[in-house]
Amino acid sequence: MVLCICRAVTDREIDAAVHAGAKSVDAVGACCGAGTDCGACRDAIAERIEDSCAACPRRGTSDCRSAGVALASASH
């Protein structure tokens, strides 16, 4: 499903950015462009990040990437 209409970014692309280490809406935007135009999808992106982190078995451990920054070179 397209989550960011302005940039035609799907929920799967956003999830891939989060799994690659994007842990903020701005980091997702740097990775795939979502949320960088009109901003209407930013709340949905933040919700996907939170849901992803909540389900992660590494949350709160030394292995947790929640403070990580997305790789700007990640493809979409």
Image (spheres, grey):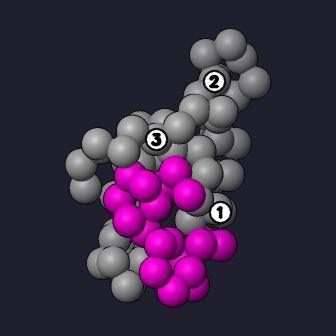
The residue at which mark 1 appears reads as 47
Q: Check the image and report above or below for 6 versus 62.
A: below
Q: What x and y, as percent, mark residue 10?
A: 34, 69
Does the magenta portion include 38? yes
Whether residue 37 is visible, yes or no, is yes
The residue at which mark 2 appears reads as 64
- The quarter holding residue 65 reads top right
Q: Check the image and report above or below for 31 versus 7.
A: above
Instruction: Check whether the beta carbons of the residues at disc 2 and disc 1 lie within 8 A of each other.
Output: no
Rounded to the nearest angstrom, the CA distance separating label 3 from label 2 is: 14 Å
Whether residue 57 is visible, yes or no, is no
Select label 3 or label 2 by which is in front: 3
User: What amino acid type should be assigned to the residue bearing mark 2?
Assistant: Cys
Rounded to the nearest angstrom, the CA distance separating label 2 from label 1 is: 18 Å
Stretch in magenta: 26-44
For image coordinates 25% across by 55% down, the residue present is 76
The reply, left or right, for residue 51 in relation to residue 75 is right
- First in sequence: mark 3 vs mark 2: 2
Q: Residue furthest top?
A: 62
Relative depth, front residue between 6 and 60: 6
The total number of labels drawn is: 3
